Amino acid sequence: MSYSTILFDVADGVATLTLNRPDKLNAFTAEMHAELRDALGKVADPATGCRALLITGAGRGFCAGQDLTQRQMTENASIDLGETIDKQFNPLIRSLRSLALPVVGAINGVAAGAGMSLALACDITLAARSASFLQAFARLGLVPDSGSTFFLPRLAGEARARGLAMLAEKISAEQAAQWGLIWKVVDDDKLTAEAVALARHLATQPTKGLAMIKHALDQSSANTLDQQLDLERDLQRTLGHSADYREGVKAFLEKRPPKFTGR
Ligand code: T3D
């Protein structure tokens, strides 16, 4: 499949996915969703050799959420948004969160609506100092979707989640970092280099272990302590048989840097 709304490239174990509709601040269209689905399928395919994914946007925006020009409203128009959520946005967030490798978000500009949800769904999110975040949904009479009602209270706490979602006020990257919505803020001219370096570093790390860290953290808010302790035991048991664990211990004892293979 050739892509017209995204750029996709794999090098050195890192897949880079760039949303590429800069004139529309990389707003989502049905076509973009189809291309994202295809690209994420490649990232998940072990044959591609991806051990980390980097997501960013082209131009001055990261992603402005759903392209509203695809939602032209006539008097009394009514559209089944449940259908687009079910077929486009939910599969995107589900496939991102279930990727068995780390996902780095490099938020280069405004992230609004489902674009902000996408930023929150990444495992480690860096943002340019000039970037901003907007839960635009309430301005349209909608609820936050694409996981925002899940991520916001967990990351920022109830009070901030409610304020962000109901007031739909744009916040700065600094504010997003202070509230725990993202990992850190980087000077604009350093964002790409820092995000690429981070993704390359993660691609050299124990991929299986990182995937299981994601899994354990994803389960933790729904589990009791007992359930979580059992889960940690089970994951540790699996990882104890991995080549990367053997290499990690060996390298430590031999006082040399480890060479992880992701197995
Ligand atoms: O529909 C469903 O399937 C349900 C799912 C919904 C998920 C959602 O994401 S709902 C939320 C949709 N997104 C929004 O409501 C955000 C709308 N955009 C904005 O509020 C602002 O554009 C921003 C705050 C993001 C950025 O503002 P600013 O001043 O930096 O830029 P701008 O001038 O508004 O936008 C630049 C261009 O991008 C402009 O086009 P033009 O006039 O130069 O030709 C603008 O119309 C376009 N653009 C920005 N956002 C969207 C968009 N075009 C289509 N859809 C957009 N979402």
Image (cartoon, rainbow, N blue to C red):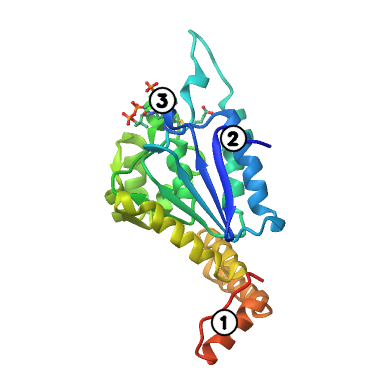
Mark 2 surroundings: few (<14), some (14-19) or many (≥20) residues within 10 A:
some
Disc 3 designates what residue? 140
Is 160 left or right of 76, judged from the image as shown?
left
Identified by mark 1, the residue type is Gly
Identified by mark 2, the residue type is His
Mark 3 surroundings: few (<14), some (14-19) or many (≥20) residues within 10 A:
few
Residue 79 sits in which quadrant? top right
At x 59%, y 29%, the residue is 30
Q: Secondary structure at mark 2?
A: helix
Is 183 left or right of 252, judged from the image as shown?
left
How far is the residue under mark 1 from the one under mark 3? 51 Å
How far is the residue under mark 2 from the one under mark 1? 39 Å
At x 67%, y 49%, the residue is 42
Identified by mark 3, the residue type is Leu
Disc 2 designates what residue? 33
Q: Earlier in the sequence, mark 1 or mark 3?
A: 3
Mark 1 surroundings: few (<14), some (14-19) or many (≥20) residues within 10 A:
some
Q: Earlier in the sequence, mark 2 or mark 1?
A: 2
Disc 1 designates what residue? 248
- The residue nearer to you, when weighing 112 against 221, is 112
* Residue 118 shows up from this direction: yes
